[in-house]
Image (tube, coloured by chain):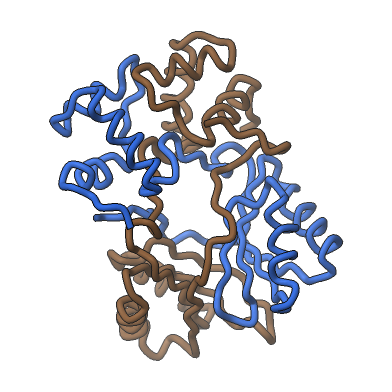
Chain colours: A brown, B blue
């Protein structure tokens, strides 16, 4: 799907958020030079197609006390990876779970599962739970804790134009 | 950490998705929470000021727009860490960037509307820093849904 110029303008106008005013879609319409009905229709369509994942409050989980963030990475046999990945992804506390390529010999890990908590101990307990679930199918794993957010923005238009 | 009362918590837990697409969406969303339109807007402004939310609005998915997303990692020498972070962050295609405890200590997400933008952004960062960018594209997505409960 190639982005129409209207959708491109909507993205540029809202990737930094919607105005916190009674008629936010009308405000956006005025900003991009179309009418509210068009904005509403495009948002409905973009949400349906998955181009917009969801609309609402994007929490700052660090400010809310969820400060421990562990990226657990696992070396799983290729023939077992999809079965194991689906199982790990179903754990209620795993927020992201992906298969990614190894970079041998330095990086043997092909399964990534993100776990969060208020403390490192909480995250490590969750990783332990993942480890029990995977069992001997894991040939090794590590947990990479985040130390600091260096940048966090939404999708930006090239040129860095983001709207409030 | 901002102090949150039960109404703030209800807003944070209940409004991480499903915000109406309508003429008066805050009035509709407020109704479900037992708040007037103006009370909800006021609460959201305060949550934003307090830093409890990073923004309010659509979560765009560049892949759903025909673009691409890729995780990338770098091993950055400690003494160059801050200057390299500035170089990486200066790229608008870099959406998130985290310092992590590992030999690969900088992990960022490249998000572009043109699929070829992943490789070109990584190449630009390599040229500007002299460091290798390890691309870790997702080959399969087993689960993604990050919501916070407070």
Q: Foreground residue, B32 or A63?
A: A63
Residue depicted at x 48% and y 75%: A145
Quadrant for the N terminus of chain B in the image: bottom left
The vertical placement of A40 against B20, above or below, is: above
Q: Quadrant of residue B22?
A: top left
Q: Foreground residue, B48 or A29?
A: B48
Q: Report the side of B101 relative to B58 (left or right).
A: right
Residue A80: x percent and y percent? 46, 78
Residue depicted at x 56% and y 27%: A13
Q: Report the side of B62 relative to A23 (left or right).
A: right
Residue B15: x percent and y percent? 28, 39
Q: Quadrant of residue B38?
A: top left
Residue reaching furthest left?
A: B34
Q: Report the side of B28 relative to A22 (left or right).
A: left
Please indicate, yes or no, whether residue A81 appears anywhere in the rendered image: no
Quadrant for the C terminus of chain B in the image: bottom left
Residue A18: x percent and y percent? 45, 29
Residue depicted at x 45% and y 35%: B58
Q: Quadrant of residue A128?
A: bottom left
Residue B143: x percent and y percent? 40, 59
The vertical placement of B17 against A95, above or below, is: above
The vertical placement of B140 against A147, above or below, is: above
Residue depicted at x 38% and y 54%: B145
The vertical placement of A160 against B144, above or below, is: above
Please indicate, yes or no, whether residue A63 appears anywhere in the rendered image: yes
Count of numbered badges drawn on the protein: 0
């Amino acid at each position: 799907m190639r982005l129409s110029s209207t959708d491109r303008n909507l993205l540029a106008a809202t990737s930094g958020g919607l105005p916190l005013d009674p008629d936010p879609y009308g405000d956006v319409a005025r900003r991009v030079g179309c009418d509210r009905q068009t904005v509403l229709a495009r948002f409905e369509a973009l949400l349906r197609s998955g181009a917009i994942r969801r609309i609402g409050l994007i929490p700052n989980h660090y400010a809310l006390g969820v400060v421990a963030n562990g990226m657990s990475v696992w070396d799983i046999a290729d023939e077992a990876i999809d079965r194991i990945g689906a199982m790990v992804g179903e754990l209620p506390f795993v927020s992201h779970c992906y298969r990614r390529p190894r970079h041998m010999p330095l990086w043997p890990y092909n399964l990534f599962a993100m776990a969060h908590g208020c403390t490192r101990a909480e995250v490590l307990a969750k990783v332990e739970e993942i480890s029990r679930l995977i069992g001997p199918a894991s040939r090794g794993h590590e947990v990479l804790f985040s130390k600091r957010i260096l940048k966090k923005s939404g999708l930006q238009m090239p040129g860095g134009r983001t709207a409030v | 950490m901002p102090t949150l009362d039960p109404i703030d918590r209800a807003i944070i837990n209940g409004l991480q998705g499903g915000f109406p697409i309508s003429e008066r969406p805050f009035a509709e969303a407020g109704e479900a929470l037992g708040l007037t339109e103006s009370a909800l807007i006021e609460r959201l402004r305060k949550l934003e000021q307090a830093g409890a939310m990073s923004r309010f609005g659509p979560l765009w998915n560049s892949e759903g727009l025909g673009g691409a997303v890729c995780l990338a990692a770098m091993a950055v020498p400690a003494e160059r860490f801050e200057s390299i972070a500035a170089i990486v962050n200066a790229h608008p295609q870099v959406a998130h960037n985290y310092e992590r405890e590992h030999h690969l200590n900088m992990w960022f997400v490249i998000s572009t509307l043109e699929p070829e933008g992943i490789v070109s952004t990584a190449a630009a960062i390599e040229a500007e820093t002299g460091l290798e960018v390890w691309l870790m594209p997702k080959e399969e997505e087993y689960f993604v849904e990050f919501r916070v409960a407070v």
